Image (cartoon, rainbow, N blue to C red):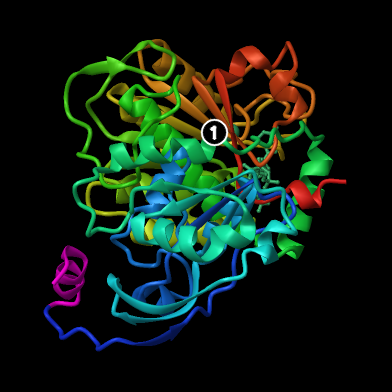
């Protein structure tokens, strides 16, 4: 019995493997007119067929590898996986249309019929073809290459059965995929254009609450990097997963400054949807083993902005015993929470900030946050540092000074303006949705 078959049996908890049966490929390929590489597996495993999508086994590392390659959080559902592929100009399919196979055992494949690659190659400017494992490469060479005239490059399998390949090694091996696609550089858009774009994204199938979930997850992802002292570089070989809670000691923070590592992270949430990003980020950080203290002016059930209210209610219910929510704390309490914080998230005000002064209590929160940063707390801002006009870059008297600004979907002009840029630190655009087809 092959290693693949043994491990499949182990994953199935010792249940007997099904006998070889005819399997038809039923999952549509992912591609469009911007796809520049084609990545091919052999045939979806029983788990993938059950999930209705490629690499559906939770232990398969394909999605973790892809996310690490592009330095972004791991997608959590099939819509996000499709979105990642299209955003990154990657087409995904399998070599076979049908075959006889036992379970997920490549070694048992017989009577293989190939998929018609012309379907993708005639529609997309594919430059390179990659196969995710030796069986796919062998079958592609035999059954597809004569028709396509394109040789495929063999990549190691991301299957858990291929345990000899660690995640960092897999990421390095797959780097050729990332290097073969043209990065999309989103244009800076005016704030009203961003609002219109969010509407277009919703109309294209990603509702605002799903978009906020992605925004908060990306914010947490960059915040965790800042905590780990990786803020200034592209993360290699790192995938989402629990981290130990903040321990003692000192590390380099996002701006290369010394950051104290003891104490929970503090997440400041305003009353609008920028605050919603903060609530989602708090939930993710807590889930990843980083305890948080959420500071909010209003309890979740007092919020009225949607989807922020739903996000806050969900996050407050999900936080573990190591984390806590502080509703309308006085300034002394805010300062005390910040005293030992290695990390603070600014989700007070975003594109909805209006007027040129920040109203209480947010003005005093911003003063406390900036003072903490001077003492070594790494500050990560959601969308735009609070107090800064995302549109013009004009800064209110109380404006957050961030080490990293995670701006959602596209850059906004205020972050790039000479007046605004010094407040932002490193700007990371969170590519929350596939927007190329939506831009005029
Ligand atoms: N609409 C969506 O689904 C998404 C929105 N996103 C986030 O939502 C943000 C925009 O949300 P909103 O339009 O709700 O606006 P904000 O949350 O940026 O600001 C509105 C809130 O700030 C208060 N406010 C405005 N001016 C103030 C001032 N001068 N002093 C004190 N408080 C003031 C308002 O009373 C309101 O509570 C973006 O910046 C982004 O972070 C992202 O999650 C992506 C998805
Ligand atoms: K903010």
Q: Quadrant of ligand 2?
A: top right
Residue 21 lies, with reference to residue 342, above or below; the image says below
Which quarter of the rendered picture does the N terminus lie within?
Answer: bottom left
Question: In the depicted view, which residue is nearer to us: 286 or 339?
Answer: 286
Percent x, y for residue 211? 60, 54
Is the magenta region chiefly helix, strand or loop?
helix
Percent x, y for residue 152? 50, 49
Can residue 297 be seen here? The reply is no
Residue receiving disc 1: 179
Q: Kindly tell me whether mark 1's CB lies below 8 Å from ligand 1.
A: no
Percent x, y for residue 112? 44, 77
Q: How many marks?
A: 1
Q: Secondary structure at mark 1?
A: helix
Q: Residues within 10 Å of mark 1 (few under 14, many from 20)?
A: few
Percent x, y for residue 178? 52, 38
Look at 59% across and 67% down and name the residue there.
Answer: 29
Look at 32% across and 30% down and name the residue there.
Answer: 337
Residue 190 lies, with reference to residue 89, above or below; the image says above
Q: Is residue 30 magenta?
A: no
Can residue 89 be seen here? The reply is yes
Classify residue 137 as left or right of residue 393.
left
Look at 69% across and 19% down and name the residue there.
Answer: 396
Classify residue 423 as left or right of residue 32.
left
Question: In the depicted view, which residue is nearer to us: 418 or 142?
Answer: 142
Classify residue 248 as left or right of residue 113.
left
Residue 88 lies, with reference to residue 231, above or below; the image says below
Classify residue 128 as left or right of residue 233.
right
Q: Is residue 7 magenta?
A: yes
Question: In the depicted view, which residue is nearer to us: 376 or 43?
Answer: 43
Q: Which residues are magenta?
A: 1-13
């Amino acid at each position: 019995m092959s290693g693949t078959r043994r491990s499949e049996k182990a994953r199935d908890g010792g249940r007997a493997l099904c006998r070889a049966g005819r399997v038809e490929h039923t999952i549509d390929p992912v591609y469009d007119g911007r796809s520049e590489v084609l990545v091919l597996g052999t045939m979806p495993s029983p788990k993938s067929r059950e999930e209705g999508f490629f690499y559906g086994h939770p232990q398969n590392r394909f999605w973790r590898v892809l996310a690490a390659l592009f330095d972004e959080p791991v997608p959590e559902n099939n819509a996000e996986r499709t979105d990642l592929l299209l955003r990154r100009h990657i087409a995904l399919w399998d070599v076979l249309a049908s075959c006889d196979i036992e379970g997920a055992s490549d070694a048992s494949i017989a009577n293989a019929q190939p998929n018609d690659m012309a379907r993708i190659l005639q529609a997309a400017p594919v430059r390179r073809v990659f196969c995710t494992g030796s069986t796919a490469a062998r079958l592609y060479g035999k059954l597809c290459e004569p028709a396509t005239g394109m040789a495929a490059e063999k990549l190691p399998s991301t299957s858990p059965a291929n345990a000899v390949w660690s995640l960092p090694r897999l990421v390095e091996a797959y780097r050729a995929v990332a290097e073969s696609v043209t990065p999309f550089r989103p244009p800076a858009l005016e704030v009203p254009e961003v609002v219109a774009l969010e509407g277009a994204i919703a109309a294209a199938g990603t509702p605002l609450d799903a978009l906020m979930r992605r925004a908060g997850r990306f914010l947490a992802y960059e915040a965790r990097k800042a905590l780990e002292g990786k803020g200034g570089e592209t993360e290699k070989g790192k995938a989402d997963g629990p981290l130990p809670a903040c321990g003692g000691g000192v590390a380099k923070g996002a701006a290369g400054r010394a950051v104290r590592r003891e104490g929970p992270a503090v997440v400041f949430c305003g009353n609008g949807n920028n605050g919603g990003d903060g609530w989602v980020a708090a939930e993710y950080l807590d889930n990843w083993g980083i305890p948080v203290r959420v500071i909010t002016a209003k309890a979740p059930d007092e919020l009225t902005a949607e989807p922020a209210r739903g996000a806050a209610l969900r996050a407050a219910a999900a936080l573990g015993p190591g984390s806590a929510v502080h509703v309308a704390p006085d300034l002394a309490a805010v300062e005390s929470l910040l005293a030992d914080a290695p990390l603070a998230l600014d989700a007070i005000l975003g594109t909805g900030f209006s007027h040129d002064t920040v109203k209480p209590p947010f003005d005093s929160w911003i003063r406390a946050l900036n003072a903490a940063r001077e003492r070594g707390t790494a500050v990560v801002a959601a969308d735009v540092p609070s107090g800064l006009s995302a549109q013009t870059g004009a800064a209110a008297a109380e404006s957050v000074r961030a080490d990293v600004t995670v701006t959602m979907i596209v850059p906004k002009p205020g972050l790039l303006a000479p007046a605004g840029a010094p407040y932002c630190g490193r700007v990371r655009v969170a590519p929350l949705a596939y927007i190329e087809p939506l831009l005029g």
